[in-house]
């Protein structure tokens, strides 16, 4: 097996394009599971990843939710971190010097309470060296809309993405929530507003209860479910969205092996994000890169683009239920 950091020129090409971005391979480190990159720098060469995405960033620092914040579940985990982060000012001063040396594209996941906040963060990040673009987390309450989640309505998503698009010339990707009625409608709103790509799925809302004390396991009561348990939902949504959009789709949700990643790519994902798997194995992303390349060698597939969206379905097949 060829190590990700030592891909041979004559081997299969893992290069893929996300709008203006070219990635050396399709494996990205997902937001929220990779810190600011520096936490993993002594364990893996970041330059071996296709890209990395920092944990969510807001204008002002956030302390996050009260503990406990994590809970293991069957085939997954719940988290209720509460988007704890250092805030934009500290990020630009303390985190970007390291990120400039990452040797892979760095995207910053951003969120806000209003569309104006999203745009302001994106504008200031576009001036920061070492930041290739932003991933917009729309799974946040819109304070101007009475606390409704931005991601739940196509109109709100369009509003946020439009403002961000006008604020930055950099790459813009929108991270979509599965907790909606029509994921395709939401994805189309992001595309129409100027997004370069969409990523999905974010976590599903879940609950865990301690039967001994009869209280919620998490301090926030509910949390976001991630891990292998959500992969079938992520695959279905990626397949649906990829058939309807012109912009690239980045798949995530339960990817712990190269086979998982390949399923998403075959379903239509141009790239994938690895999240919870990094809590189990810090080198999970690199192993997945190696596994994809090995698969391509065995099956004589010269270019990753030959795999993207190659799912074979009957013409009379539909989404099903």
Image (cartoon, rainbow, N blue to C red):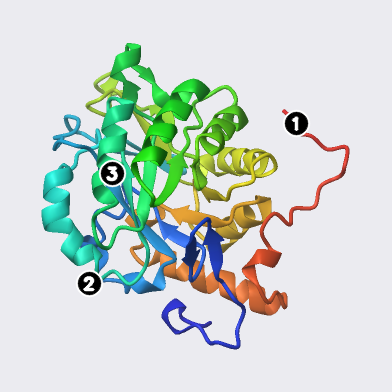
Number of labelled discs?
3
Q: Quadrant of the C terminus?
A: top right
Within 10 Å of disc 3 (Cα), the crowding (few <14, some 14-19, many 20+) is: some
The residue beneath circle 1 is 320
Tell me the CA gap for discs 2 and 1: 46 Å
Q: Nearer the viewer, mark 3 or mark 1?
A: 3
The residue beneath circle 3 is 123
Which of the 4 image quadrants contains residue 82? top left
Rendered residue at 44%/40% (across/down): 175
Give the mark, 3 or 1, whose residue is nearer the N terminus.
3
The residue beneath circle 2 is 42
Within 10 Å of disc 2 (Cα), the crowding (few <14, some 14-19, many 20+) is: few
Q: Is 84 on the left-hand or right-hand side of 152?
A: left
Which residue appears farthest toward the top when viewing the image? Answer: 146
The secondary structure type at the circle numbered 3 is helix
Tell me the CA gap for discs 2 and 3: 31 Å
The secondary structure type at the circle numbered 1 is loop
């Amino acid at each position: 097996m060829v190590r990700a950091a030592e891909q041979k020129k004559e081997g299969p090409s893992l290069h893929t394009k996300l709008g203006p971005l070219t990635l050396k391979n399709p494996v990205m480190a997902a937001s929220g599971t990779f810190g600011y990159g520096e936490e993993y720098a002594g364990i893996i060469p970041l330059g071996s990843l296709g890209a990395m995405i920092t944990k969510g960033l807001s204008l002002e620092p956030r302390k996050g939710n009260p503990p406990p914040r994590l809970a293991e579940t069957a085939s997954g985990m719940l988290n209720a971190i509460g988007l704890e982060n250092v805030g934009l000012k500290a990020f630009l001063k303390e985190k970007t010097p390291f990120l400039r040396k990452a040797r892979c594209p760095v995207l910053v996941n951003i969120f806000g309470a209003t569309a104006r906040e999203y745009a302001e963060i994106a504008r200031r990040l576009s001036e920061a060296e070492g930041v290739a673009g932003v991933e917009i987390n729309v799974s946040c309450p819109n304070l101007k809309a009475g606390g409704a989640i931005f991601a739940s309505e196509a109109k709100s998503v369009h509003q946020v993405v439009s403002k961000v698009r006008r604020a930055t010339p950099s790459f813009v990707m929108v991270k979509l929530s599965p907790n909606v009625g029509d994921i395709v409608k939401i994805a189309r709103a992001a595309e129409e507003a100027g997004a370069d790509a969409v990523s999905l799925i974010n976590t599903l809302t879940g609950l865990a209860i301690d039967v001994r004390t009869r209280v919620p396991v998490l301090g926030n009561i509910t949390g976001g479910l991630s891990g292998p348990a959500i992969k079938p939902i992520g695959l279905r949504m990626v397949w649906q969205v990829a058939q309807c959009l012109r912009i690239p789709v980045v798949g995530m949700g339960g990817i712990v092996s190269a086979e998982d990643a390949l399923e998403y790519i075959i379903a239509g994902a141009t790239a994938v994000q690895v999240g919870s798997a990094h809590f189990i194995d810090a080198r999970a992303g690199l192993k997945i890169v190696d596994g994809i390349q090995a698969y391509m060698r065995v099956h004589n597939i010269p270019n990753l683009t030959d795999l993207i969206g190659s799912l074979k379905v009957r013409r009379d097949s539909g989404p099903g239920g």
